[in-house]
Image: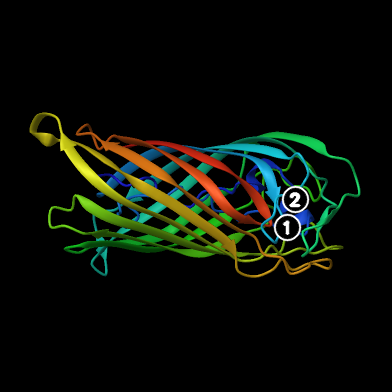
Amino acid sequence: MKRSNRAGRICLVLATGATLTACASAQIRGVYSPGSNLSGAGGVPDPGFSYSNQFWYNTADRLYAPDGKPRPDDDNFFALIDNNSFTLVPKSKLWGAKLELMVDVAISKGSFSAIDSNVVISKSGLATLEQQTYGVSAVGFTNINFVPFDLGWNFKRLDLQVGASIYAFSGRYTPLLRDNLSSGCWTFGPQVGATIYLTKSKSNQVSVYNYYAWNTQEARRPADPVTPGQNESIDYSLSHTFSFGKEEKWSLLAGPAGYGQWQTTANERRDSQGLKYTIQAGGFTVNVSTPYKGVYFGTSQLWEYDAHDTYEGRTRIVTGGINF
């Protein structure tokens, strides 16, 4: 079964111009779009060139305070990220592992009606609105994601990959601009993925993907420097693979899945209150692998819960790819 594209993805809010990320006390979300790598997280493609496209869509209608209680404001938000990933795996190996090189060029479209960037969410869950609500709509190229190296090993009951992922704020960014398309900072971090096969036939598997993000200080803000906090993202699934078709060359992987993302360090800025967001989600993932040049496609649906200091909504993902 071909794995879903394992490259890190662009964030829920930063990529769509929601300036709440750095300008409010709440960071809201990190740069990785959770749920992007729910299955086959330990796999690296066979040697050659491959392309994948992933539509990542999130909608939310409620902002939750640090204590986990919903805000009384009528907030709503949606973000659509179209990721175009180009991957090269050379024939030669390094330390017995396949070497993967990847670049992801993404286009985002988002719109939300939310609190102004001057909002302060206190630890008690109360908020002070200094201005009225406003609408934001933005579309265009957003952060570019690079994977300069990723090593993948295949063992009897385990596929394992370890690498590095870098986000460059290549999209439009101006401090306090309400329709920014970039995060305004560089993000670096390790990514680790594992696929554990529970049976000899490898039809049952557990997949876990982890990305830890370090953010640099936002650019072009010398008078009011801001460094978004570090954050952790984990995608996971328990799935079964069904083979079908002539000579069973087709396969379908399906099972429950989920993700978690949480801030590990507070934002660094003058008015920071030390708040940290968390979000969890659960749902399912389905992937189909075909015998035609490694063509694969899939979809996932997840519902978020247990939100603290961030939005809570629903995530839908549609992925397709081909190996040349």
Q: Where is residue 304 in the image (x, y as percent from the top left)?
A: 54, 48
Instruction: Name which residue lies at 78% across and 42% down.
Output: 178
Classify the position of the C terminus by image quarter: top left
Q: Quadrant of residue 277?
A: bottom right
Label tally: 2
Q: Seen in the image, is 259 located left or right of residue 250?
A: right
* Element type where label 2 sits in the image: helix
Marks 1 and 2 in Cβ contact (< 8 Å)? yes
Which residue is tagged 1? 26
User: Among all residues in the image, which is located at the extreme right?
Assistant: 130
> Which coloring applies here?
rainbow
| Residue 249, placed above or below residue 170 | above
Q: Which amino acid does label 1 sit on?
A: Ala
Q: In terms of depth relative to the viewer, which is nearer, 104 or 156?
A: 156
Real-space CA distance between mark 1 and mark 2, rounded to the nearest whole angstrom: 7 Å
Which residue is tagged 2? 20
